[in-house]
Structure formats: C-alpha cells, structure tokens
Image (spheres, rainbow, N blue to C red):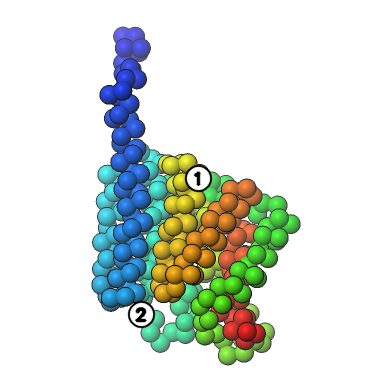
C-alpha cells in the first residue's frame, strides 16, 4: 500500500487534536507552578507537616503525570519537576534537628544529587544537553563575580544570622565548599541545567525562562519577603539568559555559590 494514504491530511480538525494536546500539557505545566506555590505557602504560614503532605501529593501527581505522558520531551519535563517538591520534602523531613544548619545543606544535597542523576538518565540527557561543561573559562569567571554584589543586595533584604562564629580560614573553608557544591552547583544544575532544558524543548526558550525562574522564586517563599521574591525572580531570569548565551552552568553556579557565601558567611560580619 502506498504510504501516502496512511498520513492524515492537515485539516483544522486534525490540527486541533495535535496542538490541543500540547496546549493541554502547557495548562498542566503552568498549573504546577501554582500548586508548588500553594504548598510553600502552607509550609510557611500554616504548618510544615501539612506542607510536607502537600509536597508529597504534588510529587505523586507529577510522577503519575509523567507515567501517563508518552511524549518524550514532556515526560522529561515532568520528571525534572519532581525534583522541586523533593527539595522541600528533604529539607523538612530529614532528621537534622541536632545538626548545625550549615551541614544540613550537605545532608539534603546528597539525595537530591542522586535524584537529579536518575532524572538525567531517564530523560536521556547528555552533559552538553544540560550545559554541564566548562565553557570559556574567562567568561565563566567573569560571570561568577556577579555573586559578590548579588549576595550583598540580598543580605540587605534578609539580614540572616551568620552560619559561622568568625571569619577564619579554619572555620570558613568547609562552609565555602558546601555552599558552592550543595547550593550553587546543585540548584543551578536543577534549574538552569535540567529544568530549563526540558522546558525549552516543550514550550520554547522565552517561555521556558519565565517558567524555570518562576519555580526558583516560588521556593524562596520560605524567606517571607516579597522584595526578596522579586529579586530572586530577576536573578533567575538573568542566570537563565547567561546559560543560554554561554552554554554552561559553571559561571552561574559559582555566582550562586558566592551569593550564598556572602549572604550567610561574609556580609553578616561586614555590614
């Protein structure tokens, strides 16, 4: 049989089926931004226990959605989104009451790194797909310097207590390493590497930037600062553009790490 007769004509009806499914996926995808925000609001303003339950339900919903989605690119996006409620669940449910706050970042990052590695494998991503390369070193070093003013600005909003008692080499070297790897690199791997890539393949780069940035900002509701929320949203947007241009998450990972180092280790002693 001639294969020409097996292809459906591109009529308004067939087009509505083809693009309607994609629009429906977009509706569900944006709905998860609101659901994650609702879970964060419950966590912060009602009760962390209820927050864990909300995030667990959201995680289950994402896993079911991924299992029922046969489009590979959309499936990869749902899998990437499962990391977001997992971030909060790990931070709330791990038995770290007697652990110094600094080492909580390290403990929480270990299962998240494992989960991120699993999602990368399931999505079939290669290193270059998620911008996991060095890029041009001078450019990445220049980008990393953004973390110094960004940390100072965010400190003005939050004024957190320092995570160390004094700035000495003995006290600061390990916290710096933890901040760089367990916050800077891990979070940029998830948001500007995996999530941005997965979202771009489904909805295009412009929408993907807003999408990934919105999720990153939502997870900062925990700071209870509307100004910081807008600041983080703008920074996430900027970092996404930088990753798109440089094709590397290394510069923004270093900048993110330096931001947190300044916020929690340096600026509390200098300001």
Q: Position of residue 67 (x, y in %)?
A: 29, 47
**Of 267 and 184, the residue lying toward us:** 267
Task: Name the residue beneath numbered marker 1.
Answer: 206
Say which quarter of the image contains residue 60. Answer: bottom left
Q: Circle 2 sits in a helix, a strand or a loop, which is it?
A: loop
Residue, x 48% and y 70% (percent of image)? 227
Point out the residue furthest to the front here.
227
Structural crowding at the residue carrying mark 2, measured as other residues with C-alpha within 10 Å and reported as few (<14), some (14–19) or many (≥20): few
Q: Circle 1 sits in a helix, a strand or a loop, which is it?
A: helix
Residue, x 65% and y 85% (percent of image)? 270
Q: State the mark number for residue 95.
A: 2
Point out the residue furthest to the bottom here.
165
Structural crowding at the residue carrying mark 1, measured as other residues with C-alpha within 10 Å and reported as few (<14), some (14–19) or many (≥20): few
Q: Nearer the viewer, mark 2 or mark 1?
A: 1
**Of 154 and 135, the residue lying toward us:** 154
Q: Position of residue 177 (x, y in %)?
A: 59, 73
Which is nearer the N-term, disc 2 or disc 1? 2
Q: Position of residue 167 (x, y in %)?
A: 65, 86
One can see residue 43 in this view: yes
**Of 140 and 209, the residue lying toward us:** 209
Check the picture and name the quadrant holding the N terminus. top left
Q: Position of residue 238 (x, y in %)?
A: 57, 56
């Amino acid at each position: 049989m001639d294969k020409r007769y097996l292809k459906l004509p591109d009529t308004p009806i067939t087009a509505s089926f083809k693009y309607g499914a994609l629009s429906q996926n977009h509706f569900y995808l944006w709905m998860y931004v609101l659901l994650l925000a609702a879970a964060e609001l419950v966590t912060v303003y009602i009760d962390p226990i209820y927050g864990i339950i909300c995030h667990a339900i959201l995680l289950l919903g994402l896993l079911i959605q991924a299992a029922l989605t046969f489009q590979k690119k959309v499936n990869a996006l749902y899998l990437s989104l499962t990391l977001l409620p997992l971030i909060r669940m790990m931070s709330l449910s791990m038995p770290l009451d007697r652990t110094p706050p600094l080492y909580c970042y390290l403990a929480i990052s270990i299962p998240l790194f494992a989960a991120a590695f699993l999602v990368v494998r399931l999505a079939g991503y290669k290193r270059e797909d998620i911008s996991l390369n060095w890029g041009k070193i001078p450019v990445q070093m220049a980008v990393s310097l953004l973390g110094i003013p960004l940390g100072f600005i965010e400190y003005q909003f939050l004024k957190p207590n320092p995570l160390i008692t004094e700035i000495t080499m003995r006290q600061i070297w390990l916290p710096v390493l933890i901040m760089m790897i367990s916050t800077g690199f891990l979070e940029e791997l998830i948001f500007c590497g995996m999530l941005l890539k997965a979202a771009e393949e489904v909805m295009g780069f412009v929408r993907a930037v807003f999408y990934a940035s919105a999720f990153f900002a939502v997870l900062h509701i925990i700071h209870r600062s509307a100004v910081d929320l807008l600041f983080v949203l703008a920074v996430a947007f900027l970092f996404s553009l930088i990753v798109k241009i440089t094709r590397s998450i290394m510069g923004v990972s270093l900048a993110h790490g330096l931001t947190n180092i300044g916020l929690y280790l340096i600026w509390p002693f200098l300001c």
